[in-house]
Image (cartoon, helix red, strand yellow):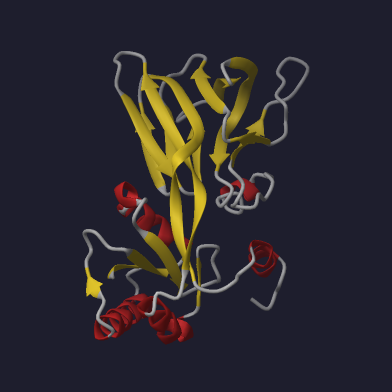
């Protein structure tokens, strides 16, 4: 089995990376940063996001596992003290692979036929750089509403506990094939009106955002922030690709939610 390690690059994470690399090599596993079978993320959920985008073209063959060197994460759920146990489990292949849905964002432009296609593990957001965001929202090719406000966020189920939750969105179990659209400070009065609630869309639905006036937007894909000019439309849908995680032991999602947001001892 081939492995690679993504470190947060602080002293503690790098020390753990060196230990894990030595242990796994001693067990006969091969260090291969180009085409690994398993990628160990050491840091936090942000570190795993970096690992995900680094191996975006190999999602069908790469499985991820995370060791957290800070607070408990939704993706990084192993503790530093458990590194030897994790290494032994990897070496013995004592794990199953679970798959979670991803978000596909396709950006089309006004002046050419090119398009930009991205995959998000957590979410994609869109904001106007200078003024209020005004977007027509289409669901399955039908006009749904004209949004006015600070921005919009489309999240995956596994990303529903991240920025989406801060915006008041629902927490969705990551096994569900869905995506969720949440508003950022929408303008609602006698003249302008939005639905004013998160929308959970199934995998066979599409959501298209079309600019009303401004055509330049700040678009985020997880931790990546990108300025797109002359935007014609942004289409969101549940991606055909999935992210694969190496699961070594039961860790129920709702326990993870409880431990992260409710249990003060964690």
Residue 233 vertical placement versus 169 (above, below): above
Q: Which of the image's four quarters has the C terminus? A: bottom right
* Residue 113 image offset from top left, x and y in percent: 30, 16
* Residue 245 image offset from top left, x and y in percent: 46, 61
Q: Residue at x 45, y 21 (%)?
A: 233
Residue 142 position by quadrant: top right
With 103 as the anchor, is 25 left or right in this view?
A: left
Residue 130 vertical placement versus 75 (above, below): above
Q: Residue at x 32, y 82 (%)?
A: 15
Q: Which of the image's four quarters has the N terminus? A: bottom left
Residue 172 vertical placement versus 237 (above, below): below
Residue 259 position by quadrant: bottom right
State the residue in front, 117 or 147.
Answer: 117
Residue 29 vertical placement versus 115 (above, below): below
With 264 as the anchor, is 214 left or right in this view?
A: left
State the residue in front, 243 or 111.
Answer: 243
With 88 as the anchor, is 248 left or right in this view?
A: right
* Residue 134 image offset from top left, x and y in percent: 56, 21
Q: Is residue 222 visible?
A: no
Q: Residue at x 24, y 59 (%)?
A: 35
Residue 178 position by quadrant: top right
Q: Is residue 96 visible?
A: yes
């Amino acid at each position: 089995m081939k492995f690679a390690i993504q470190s947060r690059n602080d002293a503690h994470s790098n020390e753990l990376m060196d230990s894990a690399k030595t242990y796994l090599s001693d067990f006969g596993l091969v260090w291969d940063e180009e085409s690994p079978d398993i990628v160990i993320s050491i840091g936090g959920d942000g570190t795993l996001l970096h690992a995900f985008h680094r191996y975006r073209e190999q999602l069908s063959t790469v499985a991820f596992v995370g060791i957290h060197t800070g607070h408990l994460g939704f993706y990084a759920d192993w503790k530093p003290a458990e590194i030897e146990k994790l290494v032994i489990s990897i070496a013995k292949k004592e794990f199953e692979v679970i798959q979670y849905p991803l978000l596909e964002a396709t950006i089309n432009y006004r002046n050419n036929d090119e398009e930009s296609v991205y995959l998000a593990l957590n979410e994609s957001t869109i904001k106007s750089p200078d003024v209020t965001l005004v977007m027509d929202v289409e669901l399955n090719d039908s006009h749904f509403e004209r949004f006015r406000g600070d921005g919009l966020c489309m999240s995956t189920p596994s990303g529903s506990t991240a920025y989406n939750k801060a915006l008041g969105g629902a927490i969705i179990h990551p096994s569900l094939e869905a995506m969720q659209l949440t508003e950022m400070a929408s303008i609602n009065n006698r003249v302008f009106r939005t639905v004013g609630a998160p929308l959970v869309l199934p995998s066979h639905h599409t959501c298209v955002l079309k600019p009303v006036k401004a055509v330049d937007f700040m678009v985020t894909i997880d931790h990546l922030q990108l300025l797109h000019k002359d935007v014609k439309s942004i289409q969101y849908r549940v991606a055909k690709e999935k992210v694969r995680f190496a699961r070594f032991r039961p860790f129920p999602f709702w326990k993870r939610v409880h431990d992260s947001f409710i249990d003060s001892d964690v």
